[in-house]
């Protein structure tokens, strides 16, 4: 009696229970697979980050190269500008200063037809080579005042750079019209006592004392012309 009662108290295994029991191991394996996939996916995602980081690092490291290139270009431009400035300064320093020149007037080509054609001669009295280029500024003066207009340029001679060693000269032909060739009221004839000369590119002047020429006191009367400087003193 006791044995039968014990057997009847145990629940009978039903088909549903057996099915759940059989499915459980399958679900366990599936979960394990899913977990493994998740871990792999996480690893892959983590693996992508170093690649991006490296790319960013490489890109960042490229920036100094661009900066260096820009700095190099800027340095080259600065050096070029400095060289140009030095070259310009060298040219400017080689120009004959008025203080290193003397001015004289020679007979030149003499005179005729109411005009005279003396040569203005500039001589290097300094101790170093220097250069002159172009037209001197020339005017007649009386009592410290300019008489008549300053010399107009005569372009029959092409300007050239002339190097003057110490003692060398350059000359420019002048044409000075006789004041008597003008109507007296348009000229106002006045005896000149000096010729004022500005060497090319200079603001300081040189003076030549002379009593050989009569100028016009009327300021805009064109009584003189001047040619560009030529090598030598013009002596034949």
Image: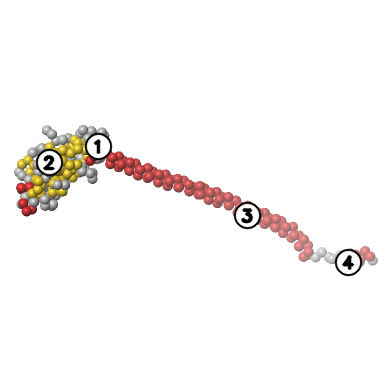
Is 65 situated above or below 29? Answer: above
Quadrant of residue 205 within the rendered picture: top left
Percent x, y of residue 46:
61, 52
Residue 41's tag is 3
Q: Earlier in the sequence, mark 1 or mark 4?
A: 4
Q: What element carries label 4?
A: helix
User: What is the distance, in whole Å, between disc 1 and disc 2 at their CAs?
Assistant: 28 Å
Indicate the position of residue 86 as horizontal and vertical percent values.
33, 41
Query: Which residue bears the numbered disc 2?
Result: 210
Q: Mark 1 points at which residue?
A: 130
In terms of sequence position, does the residue under pointer 2 or pointer 4 come before the other?
4
Q: Distance between the residues labelled 2 and 4?
A: 160 Å
Quadrant assignment for the C terminus: top left
Q: Which mark is residue 75?
A: none
Q: Nearer the viewer, residue 31 or 205?
A: 205
> In the image, residue 80 lies at what x, y percent?
35, 43
SS of the residue under disc 3: helix
At x 12%, y 41%, the residue is: 210
- Report which residue position mark 4 lands on: 8
């Amino acid at each position: 009696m006791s044995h039968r009662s014990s057997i009847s108290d145990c629940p009978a295994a039903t088909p549903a229970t057996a099915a759940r029991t059989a499915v459980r191991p399958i679900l366990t394996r599936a979960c394990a697979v899913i977990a493994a996939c998740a871990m792999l996916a996480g690893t892959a995602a983590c693996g992508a980050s170093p690649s991006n980081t490296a790319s960013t690092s490489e890109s960042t490291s490229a920036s100094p190269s661009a900066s260096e290139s820009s700095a190099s270009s800027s340095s080259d431009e600065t050096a070029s500008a400095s060289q140009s400035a030095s070259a310009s300064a060298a040219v400017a320093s080689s120009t004959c200063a008025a203080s290193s020149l003397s001015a004289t007037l020679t007979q030149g080509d003499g005179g005729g037809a109411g005009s005279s054609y003396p040569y203005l001669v500039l001589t290097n009295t300094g101790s170093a080579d220097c250069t002159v280029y172009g037209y001197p500024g020339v005017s007649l003066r009386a009592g410290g005042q300019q008489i008549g207009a300053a010399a107009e340029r005569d372009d029959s001679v092409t300007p050239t750079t002339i190097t003057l060693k110490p003692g060398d000269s350059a000359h420019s032909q002048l044409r000075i019209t006789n004041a008597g060739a003008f109507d007296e009221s348009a000229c106002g004839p006045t005896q000149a006592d000096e010729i004022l000369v500005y060497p090319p590119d200079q603001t300081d002047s040189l003076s030549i004392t002379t009593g050989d020429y009569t100028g016009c006191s009327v300021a805009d009367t064109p009584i003189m012309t001047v040619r560009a400087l030529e090598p030598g003193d013009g002596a034949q």
